[in-house]
């Protein structure tokens, strides 16, 4: 029902910023909670941030609080992840996710994008 396409990844120096975008298909984008996950080489996929369908509620992993901001523009069917003060440990493939329930998008979301690479060299 939902297709997600991430963009905006790349190589950024430590301390720099990057904004990821996730474009969603379908007329029902606004009814989905959206999230971001990341997976570094040799590590498990971890939750990064989530936002409710209305944008009224957001959640962040402790590791990114104060540095990352998740937002959405339902008119554009797009969710964003603004990443500031990037650190080498932020290096990972970042995945966009969607689910009808906020609780699930924070853990085991139904829909996933293909991922976009973010690299922050030491």
Image: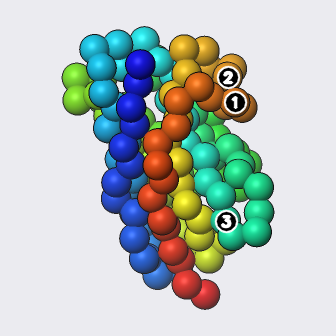
Up the image or down, 80 lies above or below 75; here it is below
Please report the residue visible at 55 percent of the width from the left and 42 percent of the height from the top. 36
The location of residue 25, given as percent across then percent down, is 30, 27
The location of residue 90, given as percent across then percent down, is 61, 66
Rendered image: mark on residue 40: 3
- Is residue 21 or residue 6 the one in the foreground? 6
User: Can you tell which quarter of the image residue 22 is in?
Assistant: top left
- Is residue 33 or residue 41 the one in the foreground? 41
Q: In this orientation, does residue 79 appear?
A: no
Mark 2 to mark 1 CA distance (whole Å): 5 Å
In contact (CB < 8 Å): disc 3 and disc 1: no
The location of residue 65, given as percent across then percent down, is 64, 49
Up the image or down, 68 lies above or below 118; here it is above
- Identify the residue under disc 1: 108
Disc on the earlier residue, 3 or 2? 3
The location of residue 28, given as percent across then percent down, is 35, 13
Rendered image: mark on residue 104: 2
Q: In this orientation, does residue 59 appear?
A: yes
Q: Residues within 10 Å of mark 1 (few under 14, many from 20)?
A: few
Task: Say left or right for 35 vs 18.
Answer: right
What secondary structure is found at the residue carrying circle 2?
helix
Q: Residues within 10 Å of mark 2 (few under 14, many from 20)?
A: some
In contact (CB < 8 Å): disc 2 and disc 1: yes
State the residue lying farthest toward the bottom.
122
What secondary structure is found at the residue carrying circle 3?
loop
Disc on the earlier residue, 3 or 1? 3
**Colour option used:** rainbow
Task: Say left or right for 87 vs 32.
Answer: right
User: Can you tell which quarter of the image residue 50 is in?
Assistant: top right
Please report the residue visible at 28 percent of the width from the left and 14 percent of the height from the top. 27
Mark 3 to mark 1 CA distance (whole Å): 18 Å
Q: Residues within 10 Å of mark 3 (few under 14, many from 20)?
A: some
């Amino acid at each position: 029902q939902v297709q997600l396409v991430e963009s905006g990844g790349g190589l950024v120096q430590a301390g720099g910023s990057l904004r990821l975008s996730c474009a969603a298909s379908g007329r029902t984008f606004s009814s989905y909670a959206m999230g971001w996950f990341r997976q570094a080489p040799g590590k498990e996929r971890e939750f990064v941030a989530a936002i409710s369908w209305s944008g009224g509620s957001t959640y962040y992993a402790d590791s990114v609080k104060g540095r990352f901001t998740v937002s959405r523009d339902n008119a554009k069917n797009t969710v964003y992840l603004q990443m500031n003060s990037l650190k080498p440990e932020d290096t990972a493939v970042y995945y966009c996710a969607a689910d009808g329930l906020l609780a699930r998008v924070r853990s085991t979301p139904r829909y996933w994008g293909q991922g976009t690479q973010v690299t922050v060299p030491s």
